[in-house]
């Protein structure tokens, strides 16, 4: 076969490839211009991928036997909780208090207004629960870690922001509880 004949065959092959590419480009443009056709093509390609590479699900999803409790995330710490006469409550780490010797001046543990004073104070753990009894005969429970931590210069947070107290309802008593064991009762006399 002569050289020019080989060159002609190669030109025919390139021309056929060029026409084939033009047809492919026209088909792809048609697909891109028609949103419904595009979705059909995507669906077909995804199904072919699933048939070629898909297998049974390997991850097993099951219900957890160990439910995570918020208390599990809180580190147990001994704290001092104070409730003022005006209804401000705050929590401070017990470690900020130091032992004082004879003749010591001490330091202020809380900032108070002139007419306010500390009415109740408890040394409890962050995992303990406070049973809060009101003058209306209602009782609320408040986990110690829910009380905001405050420094010595802070008054604390109004307890009405932590408990759903009615207007004019005042806290009468607070009972710290470490664990709720059966067979224990609370008795009040007024």
Image (cartoon, rainbow, N blue to C red):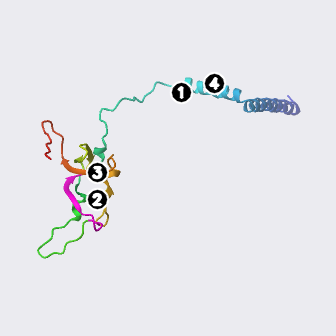
Tell me which numbered mark, 1 or 2, is placed earlier along the sequence. Answer: 1
Q: Nearer the viewer, mark 4 or mark 3?
A: 3
Residue under numbered circle 4:
44
Tell me which numbered mark, 2 or 3, is placed earlier along the sequence. Answer: 2
In space, the residues marked 1 and 4 are separated at their CA atoms by 14 Å
For the residue carrying disc 4, how many other residues have a C-alpha within 10 Å: few (<14), some (14-19), or many (20+)? few
In this orientation, which residue lies closer to the viewer: 4 or 186? 186
Q: Which mark is residue 53?
A: 1
In this orientation, which residue lies closer to the viewer: 86 or 131? 86
Q: Residue at x 11, y 74 (%)?
A: 102
Tell me which numbered mark, 1 or 4, is placed earlier along the sequence. Answer: 4
Residue under numbered circle 2:
86
Q: Residue at x 20, y 50 (%)?
A: 173
Q: Residue at x 30, y 47 (%)?
A: 73
Q: Nearer the viewer, mark 1 or mark 2?
A: 2
Q: Nearer the viewer, mark 4 or mark 2?
A: 2
In space, the residues marked 2 and 3 are separated at their CA atoms by 21 Å
Q: Which residues are magenta?
A: 110-125
Q: Residue 184, located in which quarter of the rendered image? A: top left
For the residues bearing labels 4 and 2, Cβ distance under 8 angstroms: no
| Quadrant of the rendering where the N terminus is positioned | top right
Examine the rendered structure and indicate whether residue 77 appears above or below residue 22. Answer: below
Residue under numbered circle 3:
145
């Amino acid at each position: 076969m002569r050289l020019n004949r080989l060159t002609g065959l190669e030109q025919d092959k390139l021309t056929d490839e060029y026409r084939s590419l033009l047809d492919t480009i026209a088909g792809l443009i048609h697909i891109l211009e028609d949103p419904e056709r595009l979705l059909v093509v995507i669906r077909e390609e995804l199904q072919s991928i699933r048939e070629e590479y898909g297998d049974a699900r390997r991850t097993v999803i099951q219900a957890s036997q160990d439910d995570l409790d918020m208390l599990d995330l809180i580190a147990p710490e001994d704290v001092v909780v104070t409730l003022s006469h005006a209804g401000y409550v705050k929590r401070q780490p017990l470690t900020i208090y130091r032992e004082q010797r004879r003749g010591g001046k001490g330091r202020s543990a809380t900032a108070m207004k002139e007419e306010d004073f500390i009415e109740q104070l408890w040394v409890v753990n962050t995992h303990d629960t406070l049973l809060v009894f009101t003058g209306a005969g209602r009782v609320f429970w408040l986990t110690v870690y829910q009380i905001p931590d405050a420094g010595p210069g802070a008054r604390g947070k109004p307890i009405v922001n932590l408990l759903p107290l009615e207007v004019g309802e005042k806290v009468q008593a607070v009972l710290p509880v470490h664990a709720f064991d059966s067979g224990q009762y609370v008795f009040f006399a007024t």
